Amino acid sequence: MRVAIIGQGYVGLTIGVGAAGAGHNVIGFDVNPKLVAELNSGQSHIEGISNSQVAGFIKTGSYKATTDAALLNGCEAIVIAVPTPLTDDREPDLSFIHAAVEMIQKNVKTPALVVNESTSYPGTLRNEIAARITGVDHIYASSPERVDPGNAQWGTKNTPRLIGGLTSDAVTKAKEFYSSFCDTVIEVSSPEVAEAAKIFENTFRQVNIALVNEFAQIADALGISGREVLDAAATKPYGFMEFNPGPGVGGHCIPVDPSYLAYVANEVGVPATFIKRANEVNLAMPAYVVKRVIAGAGGDLKGKSVVVVGVSYKANVADTRETPAAAVIDLLRQAGAVVSWHDPLVKAWRGEESDELGAYDVAVVVTKHDVVLEADIKKSAYIFDCTGSLAGVDGI
């Protein structure tokens, strides 16, 4: 099958490589010419996809990256895998989806299966994609992405995939496509069910992370270890699911998707109070971390050297989207600290470069990569650990 994938980020490239490996002829479209050139030279930019994989598919002709939207025409399937961020007011931003839709409208003149993998609220496929494309009898399905960067256990092949279509033909075609490289494909009754399932999955995580973040603050005020309490609670073999506290939430899903659910809930007159409170708690965690650091470092950070260890949003990946490290660093600087950061995976970020670990006045561990040695972190005089991975130090 000739397949076009719009967007070659974490989701698009992952799906592209999976489809190419299943024997499909894949066109990977992206608006970034530098990224396209790198991909066509065999360079992957994400964890879990090796340079050799990309280079191999380029060599056999089963994958090609392009900035030429005209190449979408004639494809049997077109997958939309573009960002769905939030506006500055934390409202859904569908501008990337709308741009992809306009591209399909302008360039694709033969009927195709159009699949949306981009996470959005229920009704997006029906109202924001299918309703905006006219003149060609495409068929439409929703199959929200479930990509977890850096997860060595669950990938595209073995993670169950949801399919919901506007027609039975769309469902049949989508199941045929995804079954070629996914072990388990699950049909649901409508695209709205698939869309809602995806945003609820991450809302569930957001709310529970907020709960343990709030509990961590309560436990500290009570003078007990919140992590020890959570470990103790996790010994119950039923009715409890363990989540861990941290400096906030980051990445492309958990900080964003719940706001899409809250938006559509408000549209239908159901206030999403749990989601609002969870957002408040998690967004406030960097300020709580800095407050604890100031107290632990003697009550004043003015002029003190502080290193933030790990600026990606999770361990062992280089993804800095929505990372709470940004707010932690900004608040530390507002407190008068001289702040640098160390992250061997990110290296360059926000116009700055990663510094080496050494004897700082304070080290704040936001993300602990496996390659970062505990001994190097402990060269600093005072350490605050947001990850629970270092023994014998202060932290959440």
Image (spheres, rainbow, N blue to C red):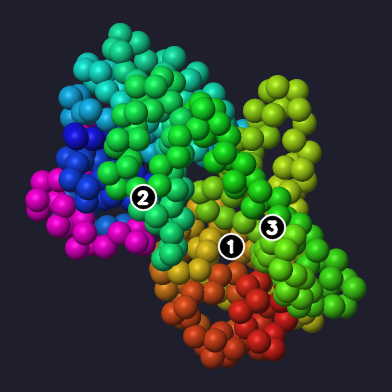
Q: Residue at x 84, y 71 (%)?
A: 219
Front position in the image: 383 or 22 = 22
Residue 86 counted in the magenta span: no
Which amino acid, by three-letter code, is at mark 3?
Ile
Q: Nearer the viewer, mark 3 or mark 1?
A: 3
Mark drawn on residue 71? none
Q: Is residue 373 visible?
A: yes
Q: Is residue 341 visible?
A: no
Q: Start and end of the magenta stretch? A: 46-69
Looking at the image, is mark 3 or mark 1 earlier in the sequence? 3
Q: Which residue is mark 3?
A: 209
Q: Residue furthest right?
A: 222
Q: Secondary structure at mark 2?
A: loop
Front position in the image: 124 or 314 = 124
Q: Which residue is mark 1?
A: 325
Q: Residue furthest top?
A: 135
Looking at the image, is mark 1 or mark 2 earlier in the sequence? 2
Q: CA distance from mark 3 to mark 2?
A: 30 Å
